[in-house]
Amino acid sequence: MFAAQLLDPRLAFLLLCILLIAAAIPIAFAWARLLPEEQPPFRFHRSSERATGELTPAPEPPDSRREPFAVLLLVCVSLSYLWQLPGLPRDFVLLCIAPYVPEPWLQELVLFTKGFLVVMPGAGAVYSIFRRNQIRAPLIAAGILVPLIWLVLPWLRAALAAS
């Protein structure tokens, strides 16, 4: 490949690390936003009627509305990111399911899975642009960076293999 001849392997490794970390950060923030917030155990009420501060349980916050479809898109974006991690045993997964699926179906399943994993981060970003949800900003960022990994990773791997 032409990119392998132009790109220094150390620079390719640095770009690969930066891209993987940059895509992992919004995914981690999105998963952290889905966790319920920890409430303080007690709150001090200071009123004119009470001379001393009495500890009472903190009131429950209103339940923030979570969209199940946005969470499903986050799962798909996370799977797409994980599929592109270097060193992931993708061939092992294919070897495990190969005895149970006929050969022509296996090839179509692999092709469908790759297409699904490439398209879903973009779909998550587009969905979050047009629909407000709890994980809007991280899903948009991850929806842009994860497909970028799919586009750039073959060139970076070729540059690393050329060394």
Image (tube, rainbow, N blue to C red):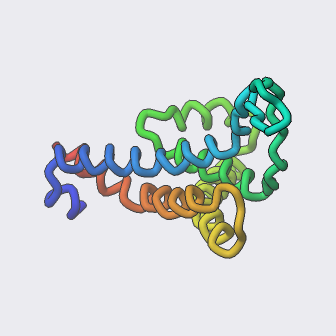
Q: Quadrant of the C terminus?
A: top left
Q: Position of residue 157 (x, y in %)?
A: 31, 48
72, 80: nearer the viewer: 72
Quick check: 143 left or right of 21? right
Depth order, front residue of 84/132: 132
Please tell me which residue is depicted at 54% across the width and 37% down the height of the picture.
Answer: 90
Residue 107 against residue 2 in the figure, above or below = above
Q: Quadrant of the N terminus?
A: bottom left
**In this orientation, which residue lies closer to the viewer: 11 or 39?**
39
Is residue 97 rendered to the left or right of residue 141?
right
Can residue 41 be seen?
Answer: yes
Q: Nearer the viewer, residue 152 or 144?
A: 144
- Total marks placed: 0
Q: Quadrant of residue 7?
A: bottom left
Please state the horizontal and vertical placement of residue 131, each as a whole percent of the image.
71, 71
On the image, the x and y values in percent for residue 158 come to 28, 51
Q: Residue at x 18, y 49 (%)?
A: 11
Q: For this view, does 141 lie left or right of residue 47?
A: left
Q: Is residue 124 above or below residue 52?
A: below
Q: Is residue 158 left or right of residue 68?
A: left
The answer to which quarter of the image holds residue 37 is top right
Residue 53, percent from left and from top: 75, 26
Q: Residue furthest bottom?
A: 130
Evaluate whether residue 115 shows in this view.
no
